[in-house]
Image (cartoon, rainbow, N blue to C red):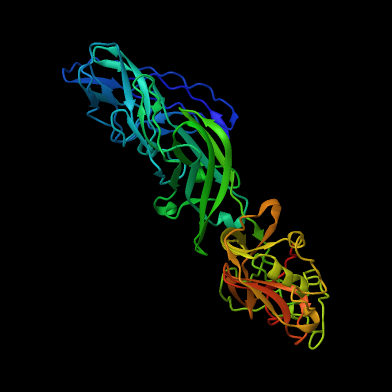
Amino acid sequence: MRKHTFKVRLLSLVALCGIVMAFASCSNDDVAQGNVDTNTEKNSNLTSFVTGAAATRTSLNYDDGAFFWEAGDHIYVKDDNGTWNKSRNAPTEKTASFKFMVPGKYTNSTTYKVYYPGKNGLNNNVTISGTQSQAQPNSTVHIGEVGDCGTADATGGNGVFNFRLDHQAAILVFQPFTNNTAVKNCQLTKIEVTSDNDITGTYTLDTTTGELTGSASGKSITMTTKGSGSYANGFPLTNSTADLATNGAYVVIRPGTHALTVRYWIKDYATNVEGAITKTYDSFKYEKNDYYDMTANINVTDYDGSKYYMWDAKNNYWNGHEWDSADPWQPVIDGYEGKYAQVEDNFYNNSGGGNKRYDAINNSCKDLPNVNEMAAYVLKGDPHWDGEKLWSAMGHLHKGGMWFKTKASISYTYYFDSQRAPNGTDMRNNGGSVSNTPKQGTPVQNYFNRYFFVPALGYYSFGSFTNIGTGGSYWTSSAHPDDSNWAYCLTFSNSVVTLDGPDSSNGSYTMKFE
């Protein structure tokens, strides 16, 4: 996290939002003070509060800290009678300077407190919204609508007062990036920010200090990152390094010491999969009038699409025509592409089996768990179906899979025996099947990595791809003793885990279990 500090410029009843970026302290040069034009206009009913030529409120230029007023911005001042007065006029477009006309009498003092409570505030009451939205990357037009605010001591007389606005909120500048091909095909749809302290709610701009006071109960903010046109589905994630222009998002929070949890929601519109990637930030003091870089590497575990094989085949199911090859035939989402890469070295090993034990001899399956070992994962591995865990394969985002206890964890309570299954038989010789009903959700006792995750990668059958995201199919090193065309395979869905002997011609996944 970086922190940049900017000095506000001298103005007439308008502000410069000084902001700072942090996680490492690195200050920019101070923004130079701007000159303010005087206004000699006299009006018995209105007093002029004039912005200077310097850029000021209420959108931000990230690079130099300059702010601009936006259409609909108003200021508030309490007059000599103690009456709150709202400026009669407001900008109609983005502008660096503006003449605000404020009703009331301002002759008893040369100094008056000026309040900018945001577009949805009133007098000195400010609401930092728990639901914020940004229509395009690196845009700050919205910050005045969701709670950015400020105060100033205006000085002058004869109908013209100058002031310097200090912003009383803090701003988080989110800049996600990724090197994962599948994630780059996704859109950033929203960002959820949660704190251990309040960051949203209704507050008061103190009449003496100008700072936000009071407490609220809002500890979470949801920033929606969608607009129209090319941003209708969300912001791109095509960048490999932090890039404001691609997906920079600005979130307004109450200043203070916060331990933050941030959930980046992404969606793959090809698979219709949406989920969150969570990042945590240690307790840190987010100061008023500052903005903070929140960069994050958005990544998920990617699984190799070339690990699908017929049982104990020499080559993978789509050898020479993998999804990322020069001539791809391999379907990457459920369906059939019309071609089937069935050639001799891709074909399953049927040289054994059939009323006898037969073990894999090729590299694709010979190092996998045998049927007895896999049965221990099914019956003793405390399987848990997790429908929310994100992962990627073959250029797309997916979610769903099964948690199993590791071999080491199983061994605390069960002798992990390669020669005998938990049912007491050697299934390599005797055949049979086993099944279990999984629990739901991530294991709550997954400390010290007691469990490992197996994604629902689906399988291929006669060239068709099925069950990705909803089911898994994983070979063992054991053929089925009853038929040379069958081999033992672990299969699962959200409701059942089964170890049985399906057709060896299926293109199931090969993975060394823990």
Q: Is residue 152 left or right of residue 299?
A: left
Q: Is residue 68 left or right of residue 275?
A: left
Q: In the figure, 3 relative to 207: above or below?
A: below
Q: Is residue 360 left or right of residue 214?
A: right
Which is nearer the eye, 407 or 51? 407
* Residue at (39, 28) in percent of width and height: 213
In the rendered image, residue 146, in percent from the top left (x then y), is placed at 38, 39
* Residue at (60, 49) in percent of width and height: 178
When asked about the image quadrant of residue 309, the answer is bottom right
Residue 318 appears in the picture as rendered: no
Which is nearer the eye, 439 or 105? 439
* Residue at (45, 43) in percent of width and height: 220
Q: In the figure, 279 relative to 153: above or below?
A: below
When asked about the image quadrant of residue 382, the answer is bottom right
Which is nearer the eye, 286 or 219? 219
In the rendered image, residue 15, in percent from the top left (x then y), is placed at 37, 25
In the rendered image, residue 33, in percent from the top left (x then y), is placed at 43, 18
In the rendered image, residue 344, in percent from the top left (x then y), is placed at 76, 81
Residue 337 appears in the picture as rendered: yes
* Residue at (81, 82) in percent of width and height: 429
Q: Which quadrant is home to the N terminus?
A: top right
When asked about the image quadrant of residue 242, the answer is top right
Residue at the extreme left: 44
Q: Which quadrant is home to the C terminus?
A: bottom right
Q: In the figure, 249 relative to 205: above or below?
A: below
Q: In the figure, 268 relative to 376: above or below?
A: above
